[in-house]
Image (tube, rainbow, N blue to C red):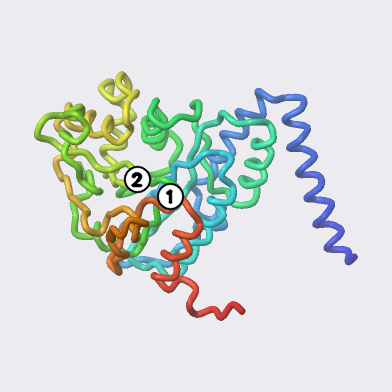
Amino acid sequence: MSFFTSISTLLLFISLTLVTLGYMFYPNNFQIHFNSLFTTSFCDPTTASESTHVSNNSGLSLFVGILSRPHLHERRQLLRSVYSLQKRNLRTADVDVRFVFCHSMSEETKMFIALEIMQYNDIIVLNCTENLNEGKTYTYFSTLPTILEGRYDYVVKADDDAYLRLDNLAVSLIDKPRIDLYYGMEIECSAAGDVCGQFKTFMAGFTYVLSWDLVEWISESDIARNEQTGLEDVMLAKWLNTADKGKNRYNGVPAFYDYKEETVDGYTWLELKPDTVALHGLKLNSKWVRTLKYFNVTNWLNVP
């Protein structure tokens, strides 16, 4: 074993030992540092391995938060690869991609998450209990203005079973307003029992975009703060509709859509599209494989 290999191994051992001791003897304090590790550093593109930008010509900046769950390590690894490959030659926008989840997790998962943080620096741990429709989305949006150093033009909320074509997303935003914007796959509120407002609409929760001013408004709004429980995409629209905000509303269909395939009863669903912005429903690895093949993600590499 070489001298440098020995040193590297020793440093890794020391890091893991410190992490373990932090959990054992100072679990509460460690949780605070565990959260602040990202809230103080993840927004610095020079410190995150994934955040090296190619200069873009549009001046456009996007923050993409992928709402996930702590134990889904394999899915995050897949998405890291998918988006880092897209960003290598992305010239239409500066894009930062981060994974977002609540701090409620087992001790085992905490250890694995700590290692991910140390390696990738691309996780935001929110001060909430893991949930789907009990305020996680509110916590996500309301937290961002307090932890990001500077503002983005747009903030994206995406699910971890959605596939974003970052270049297509950026191109679709270049000519759109950068204030009061609400963009995604538009659905009539009547489909949700008019909860979000009669004769109004909401954007499907798998991927939607808000302009930065709306994110700041959510962080300060009593309307949003006081009504967090309910279908997260419907509730967000209800906040905006109640306050008469999100008037620059754009329906991304057909570039936003659900993954479809031929079913056992012979019913044929939608095909994949070259102009895809956001594709939803990739819960199985087999669907990811078909999607990545369609977009020629690995065609240049001849894997035996």
Q: Quadrant of the C terminus?
A: bottom right
Q: Residue at x 31, y 26 (%)?
A: 220
How far apart in space, not on screen, are marks 1 and 2 (Cα)?
A: 8 Å
Q: Residue at x 34, y 61 (%)?
A: 262
Q: Is residue 113 above or below residue 96?
A: above
Q: Is residue 216 left or right of residue 79?
A: left
Residue 231: x, y in percent?
32, 31
Q: Is residue 304 above or below residue 93?
A: below
Q: Residue at x 41, y 35 (%)?
A: 140
Q: In terms of depth relative to the viewer, which is nearer, 148 or 246?
A: 246
Residue where numbered disc 2 is placed: 206
Q: Is residue 286 above or below residue 70?
A: below
In this rendering, the count of numbered labels is 2
Q: Residue at x 23, y 34 (%)?
A: 237
Kind of residue indicated by mark 2? Phe
Residue contact between numbered discs 1 and 2, judged by CB atoms under 8 Å: yes
Residue where numbered disc 1 is placed: 161
